[in-house]
Image (cartoon, rainbow, N blue to C red):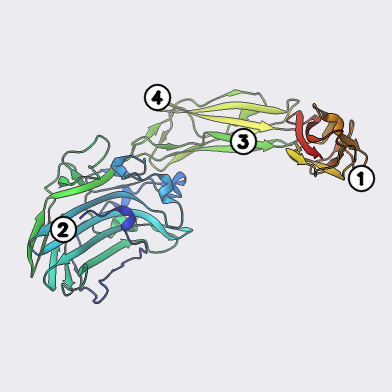
Amino acid sequence: MRIRPKALIRRPLIVTAVAAALALPALAFVAPAQALNPAGVGPPDQRQFGFPTYYTDNVGTALQMCDDGSGNCLGANNASLTPGDGENFYWMATSTLTAPGIDLSVEYALEAAWLTPTTPITFDRVRIRGDVDQAGDYTLTTPFGTTHTITADAPTVQRNLNFTEDIGCGGAPCDFAAAAGAAHITDFLVNTTRPAGYLGNAATEGPATVGIGGPVATNTVTGPSGTATSTNFAVMGKLASPRAVSVPTSLDFGNTRRARTRTVRMVNLGTQPLTLGATTLTGSAAIRQLAGSTCTAGRIVNPGGGCKVDLRYRPGRAKSAAAILRIRDTGRVHPVRVSARSTAVASVRNTIQFRPVQAGATGRTRRVVVTNTGALPLRVRGVRVAGANGRSFKIRPGVPRVCKRGTVVPTGGRCAVYLRFEPKSFGPKRAALSLRTNGLPASQTVLLTGTGR
């Protein structure tokens, strides 16, 4: 039997046992001599909801979240970890134990999930479940040198051997190292034949070792029904990038009439130190790099460490400014597109639909509101109706402030254009209200529609 990720139970605590419906299994857990490396837990990755970038075993194998959408990750992607019911795996190994009277699935996993929609957690899992034809105590000997003794219920109960134990941080805020320091896993199981960049063939069981180049991985269960042993595992795990970084691809100062300072931060999410090269900024002179920046040539950034570049935008005569910041490390370039604006913005509806009116008659006046959502006063330079049926839509006077040539609208203020539908003939009518201003965009168009009946 294979265990699919979505079939797993999602209420991880410090220790959780899931029993068969009619009886609780007795469990004896012998702690391993070692666990994963608590010092090898990667820094939080905000692109993955703040979960650790990677976990590391005792032989130095670091695994990132297996979420690239490939078959090697069983199709999981970053969306699979969406807060609430989302989940993803750093590592998982499943094995089938079968013999006369024994049909069991065993799973080991290092998982990321949610205790609540706002509480991310990680935990180490061991799961044993299936059917045996005799009740009593069964002992599972794991590839990590630990044993679990589980009491099976009567064979008349479906899945009469059923146990799950999760060990992790258990609460908020999560101590992500807890899933490494007090867990079932010592070294990640690895298929002896595996795709490049991964630890195994996630969909197919095959021979495996405990750690890369380690001893043969073996699962054995012994009890009243006999003994079943397997050295085959389906392993899921993706090697962490040694030079992964977190750098934003863009930075927007927004729309401002005053000078502003913003910071671009680079974080080393990889497993190796990075040596920085020269940082450069090209583009508008209104955007410049400040002297306090720490992403400087020759600096070494260790895993989990980072640096910053402080940028200053000072508005000038131009309505907008753009530049490209380039942060370099170990032969790579990380470009950041920088933008800024200092202008008025005319915000207006895209379409106004009038109620049908008898040809030759006049309908009710509609008001088209224009709001200045920018940082500078909005100056109206022209308002007109154009189009094939422009004569069917009339600009009318109104109150309060009317949008017309010369009108000045302060930041956050509004003006309005008053329109009346006067169809000259039968049928649908279309025209456009054109508004020209000193803002961005310089021209706004509102589609006008109505029907003469």
State the separation of the CA atoms marked 4 and 3. 27 Å
What's under tag 4, amino acid-wise?
Gly
State the separation of the CA atoms marked 2 and 1. 81 Å
List the residue tagged with mark 4: 331
List the residue tagged with mark 1: 399
What's under tag 3, amino acid-wise?
Asp
Percent position of residue 183, x then y? 26, 59
Whichever of labels 4 and 2 marks the residue nearer the N terminus, that label is: 2
Residue extending farthest to the bottom is 22
Name the one closer to the observer, 306 or 117: 117
Q: Is residue 422 above or below residue 54?
A: above
What's under tag 2, amino acid-wise?
Thr
List the residue tagged with mark 2: 142
Placement of the N terminus among the 4 image quadrants: bottom left
Q: Secondary structure at mark 4?
A: loop
Within 10 Å of disc 3 (Cα), the crowding (few <14, some 14-19, many 20+) is few
Q: Secondary structure at mark 1?
A: loop
Whichever of labels 2 and 1 marks the residue nearer the N terminus, that label is: 2
List the residue tagged with mark 3: 252
Whichever of labels 2 and 3 marks the residue nearer the N terminus, that label is: 2
Asked if residue 51 lies left or right of residue 155, the reply is: right
Asked if residue 400 lies left or right of residue 378, the reply is: right
State the separation of the CA atoms marked 4 and 2. 44 Å
Name the one closer to the observer, 444 or 186: 444
The answer to which quarter of the image holds residue 258 is: top right
Placement of the C terminus among the 4 image quadrants: top right
Within 10 Å of disc 4 (Cα), the crowding (few <14, some 14-19, many 20+) is few
Within 10 Å of disc 1 (Cα), the crowding (few <14, some 14-19, many 20+) is few
Circle nearer the viewer, 4 or 2: 2
Within 10 Å of disc 2 (Cα), the crowding (few <14, some 14-19, many 20+) is some
